[in-house]
Structures are given as structure tokens and as C-alpha cells.
Image (tube, grey):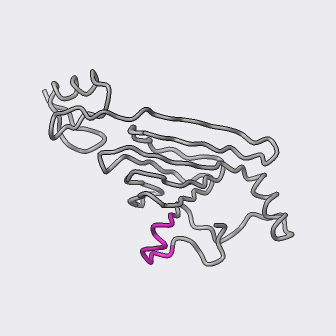
Amino acid sequence: MTYPCAVCSVTHKNEDILQASMTRGWYNWQEKEVRPVKKEIRTVVYDDELRIEAYRFGGIVQPFPNHFHAYYVIGFVEDGERVLLCKNQEYTITKGDVLLFNPGDNHACVQSDGGTLDYRGFNITKEVMLDLAEEVTGRRELLSGLSSCSTQHQKSKGRGAFPARGFL
């Protein structure tokens, strides 16, 4: 029996799926081999003074299903390459990219280079963002003109994701 894969859109045989579920590592469907995966790291800290959550993901293989947050997310891709789907727009994110998600931006991603994702990020609530805006501009209003699902990569390719007067 065969099954269509939700991750890579390839139809896999029963024995491939069984092999993948029994391995410790990343299973390469095409070459039918197990590649060792570095240990996953998931660290989250909250700074009471800054009122910001910071986190680090290392060695991540799993896809992130479609989801959204009620807060701003600013992230940095330290290593790896992923296909990011954000608000029905597809992007390729790679090492060195800076990401910005506004509250409510739906997004999902999957590894595209056969490796793993190393990523650092900050979660900033709307309330904290209002406080920061007031501290910087003197006005207690959310910054306007921020592009949803922005990446630094887009800017470098001339797609204009970050506005000239953006947050970053």
C-alpha cells in the first residue's frame, strides 16, 4: 500500500513509512537511508524587566504546521533552509534571514535542504510594543507600515519587504 506524504508530496510505500517511524534521525526517502540528526535544542526564557520572551531552536527537523500568534515575532535563521508559507505566499528562508510576523499572520514551514533549522526569536506582546513605540516616538500607537511576514532575504532580492521606515 502507498500513502501520499503531507510534507514532500511524494507517494511513499508502507515499508518507507514504517522505516521512518522506527529510526532515530532523519530518514531520506529517496536514498532509503537514515541520516543522524544533531540533538534538538529548545530553550525559552522570559525577561521580567524587558517583558519579552526569547527562544532558541537548534537541530529542528520537524515541520511547523500552519499557525499564528497573538504577538509580534522577530526571528533570525542561524542555519538551515526552509520553505515558509505565510499568508498564502511562499518564501525560501535561509541562514542570515531576519523574519517579522505581525500578530495574526498565519504561517507554516518545512525543511527544504535535508538539514536542520537553527533559529532564534523574540516574542513581543502588543502591550510591550505600544510601550516601546511610546518610548521611541513619544506616541502610544502601534508602528504602521510594517510588512507582514517580512524577511530580510526579500529585501536583499529587491522585493521590498521591509519599508524604509520599518521597525528593524
Measured along the vertical axis of the image, is residue 72 above or below residue 9?
below
Residue 60: x %, y % from top left: 43, 39
Number of on-image labels:
0
Identify which residue is drawn at 46% across, 44% down.
66
Quadrant in which the C terminus is drawn? bottom right
Identify which residue is drawn at 42% across, 58% down.
93
Is 91 positioned to the left or the right of 71 in the image?
left
Identify which residue is drawn at 30% across, 42% down.
7
Q: Quadrant of residue 12?
A: top left
Identify which residue is drawn at 18% across, 29% down.
16
Q: Start and end of the magenta stretch?
A: 151-160
Measured along the vertical axis of the image, is residue 149 above or below residue 54?
below
Residue 6: x %, y % from top left: 30, 40
Residue 2: x %, y % from top left: 15, 31
Measured along the vertical axis of the image, is residue 66 above or below residue 103?
above
Q: Quadrant of residue 25?
A: top left
Q: Is residue 152 magenta?
A: yes
